[in-house]
Image: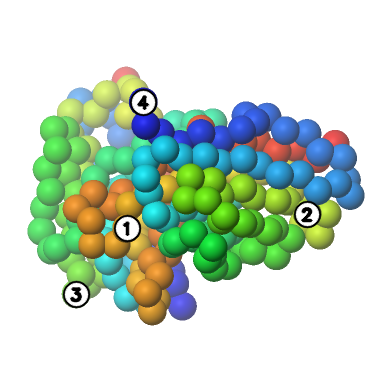
C-alpha cells in the first residue's frame, strides 16, 4: 500500500543532543514538508522541498536541518540549537503543482520529548 | 506576509449544522484545503477548493471566495465523532515553489 511513514513514533532526547526524524513516502510525490505542532496549536512549517536536492526554509527553520537526497526521503534533524524542541512533528507529501490531486498526505507523526 | 485566521473554538449540538470560517492573506494562491485532526493523530484531508464556489462531499461542504480571501467548512447532521480540530490550509505560491500554510485550527466540540 502507498503511504507516508514516519519513525519513530515516540522519541526522547537529552538536552544538547541532535536527533534525526525519519520520513519516507512511496507515493511518488515531488513535494515534502515538515511541520511542528505544539499542544492546542496549529501546524507551523519548518522546511519544505519541491524537488530532489532542493529545499526551502519555512517559518520556524532555526535549530533544524533537512536533506532531500532521494525523492522518497526527507529526514529532519533537530539540533541542539533548537531551544524548545519538545513537540509533535508531522511530515507530509503532495504531488506536483498542476496535478489534479494536490492535497498533502500526512505521516502519523513523531512525538519528541526532551528529558 | 502570510496570515490565515480561524476561530479558536466552537461548540455545536449533535444533529445540527455548523459553519467554520477561514480568512487568508497570502503571497499568491493555488488552492485551499480543509483537514480534520483528532487529538494526537495526523490530519486527514477533507476538501479542496481552487475555484470560487461550493464543493460538496457527503455531510461536508466547503466554499471559497478568492476575491474576499474567505472560505468556510460546513458540517451537516453533526455526529459526536465530528468532535475534532479543523485546519484550514492555503497553498501559497512564491516564484516556483508552493508552501502549504496552515491556520491555527478550530476545535469543534459536539454535545449531545
Which label belongs to residue A1?
Answer: 4
| Earlier-in-chain disc, 4 versus 2 | 4
* Cβ atoms under marks 4 and 2 closer than 8 Å: no
Residue A63 point in image, percent of width and height: 74, 60
Residue linked to disc 3:
B67
**Quadrant in the picture for the C terminus of chain A:** top right
- Alpha-carbon neighbours of circle 3 within 10 Å: few (<14), some, or many (≥20)? few
Is disc 1 placed on a helix, strand or loop?
Answer: loop
Q: Look at the picture and state if A2 lies above or below A76.
A: above
Instruction: Give the CA distance from mark 3 to mark 4.
Output: 40 Å
Is disc 3 placed on a helix, strand or loop?
Answer: loop
| Earlier-in-chain disc, 2 versus 1 | 2
Which residue is pictured at 14% across the width and 63% down the height? B51
- Alpha-carbon neighbours of circle 2 within 10 Å: few (<14), some, or many (≥20)? some
Q: Mark 3 lies on which chain?
A: B
Answer yes or no: is residue A111 visible: yes
Front: mark 1 or 3:
1
Residue linked to disc 2:
A79
Which residue is pictured at 16% across the width and 33% down the height? B59
Q: Which of A100 and B52 is in front in this view?
A: A100
Instruction: Give the CA distance from mark 2 to mark 3.
Output: 42 Å
Instruction: Give the CA distance from mark 1 to mark 3.
Output: 25 Å
Q: Are marks 4 and 1 on the same chain?
A: yes
Residue linked to disc 1:
A96
Amino acid at each position: 500500500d502507498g503511504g507516508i511513514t514516519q519513525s519513530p513514533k515516540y522519541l526522547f532526547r537529552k538536552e544538547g543532543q541532535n536527533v534525526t526524524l525519519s520520513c519516507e513516502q512511496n507515493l511518488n510525490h515531488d513535494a515534502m514538508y515538515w511541520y511542528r505542532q505544539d499542544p492546542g496549536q496549529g501546524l507551523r512549517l519548518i522546511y519544505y522541498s519541491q524537488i530532489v536536492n532542493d529545499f526551502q526554509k519555512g517559518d520556524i527553520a532555526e535549530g533544524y536541518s533537512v536533506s532531500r537526497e532521494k525523492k522518497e526521503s526527507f529526514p529532519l534533524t533537530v539540533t541542539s540549537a533548537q531551544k524548545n524542541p519538545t513537540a509533535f512533528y508531522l511530515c507530509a507529501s503532495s504531488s506536483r503543482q498542476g496535478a489534479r490531486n494536490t492535497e498533502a498526505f500526512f505521516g502519523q507523526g513523531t512525538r519528541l520529548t526532551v528529558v | 506576509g502570510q496570515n490565515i485566521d480561524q476561530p479558536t473554538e466552537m461548540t455545536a449540538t449533535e444533529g445540527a449544522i455548523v459553519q467554520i470560517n477561514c480568512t487568508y492573506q497570502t503571497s499568491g494562491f493555488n488552492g485551499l484545503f480543509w483537514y480534520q485532526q483528532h487529538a494526537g493523530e495526523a490530519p486527514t484531508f477533507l476538501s479542496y477548493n481552487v475555484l470560487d464556489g461550493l464543493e460538496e462531499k457527503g455531510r461536508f461542504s466547503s466554499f471559497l471566495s478568492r476575491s474576499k480571501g474567505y472560505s468556510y467548512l460546513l458540517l451537516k447532521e453533526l455526529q459526536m465523532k465530528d468532535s475534532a480540530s479543523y485546519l484550514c490550509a492555503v497553498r501559497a505560491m512564491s516564484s516556483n515553489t508552493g508552501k502549504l500554510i496552515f491556520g491555527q485550527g478550530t476545535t469543534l466540540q459536539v454535545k449531545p
